[in-house]
Amino acid sequence: MLPEELDVCYNCDNAGVPGSAIVMERISNGGNVMDDIQRLGIVLRHLIEHNEGHAEDYARWIELARSNHLTRVAELITEANEQMKKGSEALRSALNQLGVMPAEDEEHHHH
């Protein structure tokens, strides 16, 4: 069993990223016990949305590196972005394996 208070996105909370508190509230479910599969579904959707939210950030930093003639830095950031996309694909596969469809009220936009 997962702990009642599961810290989904420690880094988001520390950085004050909007949305992370909502995820935490949904996981603790106001003190009610939530099914572990439901919790995993919420966590996986959050992580996928989190990654997708950073895609725009990566594009901005790649362009900044290129505009400063830092070709290798731009290449490495591009590589990191591709790896994150692969990670999101794996998270989607995990979500599909759970067989949990996102409920309308569970969807939120991270960035």
Image (tube, rainbow, N blue to C red):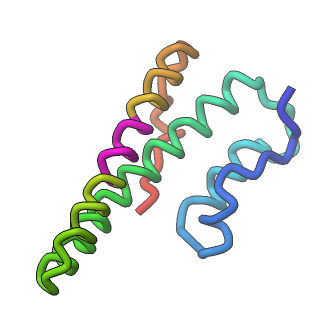
Residue stretch rendered in magenta on the structure: 81-88
Magenta stretch: residue 55 in it?
no
Is 66 placed above or below 110 here?
below
Q: Position of residue 64 (x, y in %)?
A: 20, 80
Left or right of residue 8, residue 67 in this image: left
Return the residue found at the far front. Answer: 72
Q: Position of residue 20 (x, y in %)?
A: 61, 59
Left or right of residue 60, residue 98 in this image: right
Q: Quadrant of the C terminus?
A: bottom left
Q: Quadrant of the N terminus?
A: top right
Is 19 placed above or below 86 here?
below
Looking at the image, which is closer to me, 59 or 106?
59
Q: Position of residue 72 (x, y in %)?
A: 23, 68
Residue at position x 62%, y 55% in the image: 22
Q: Main secondary structure of the magenta part?
A: helix
Residue at position x 53%, y 13% in the image: 97
Magenta stretch: residue 83 in it?
yes
Residue 66 sits in quarter: bottom left
Residue at position x 69%, y 22% in the image: 37
Left or right of residue 62, residue 21 in this image: right
Looking at the image, which is closer to me, 6 or 29?
6
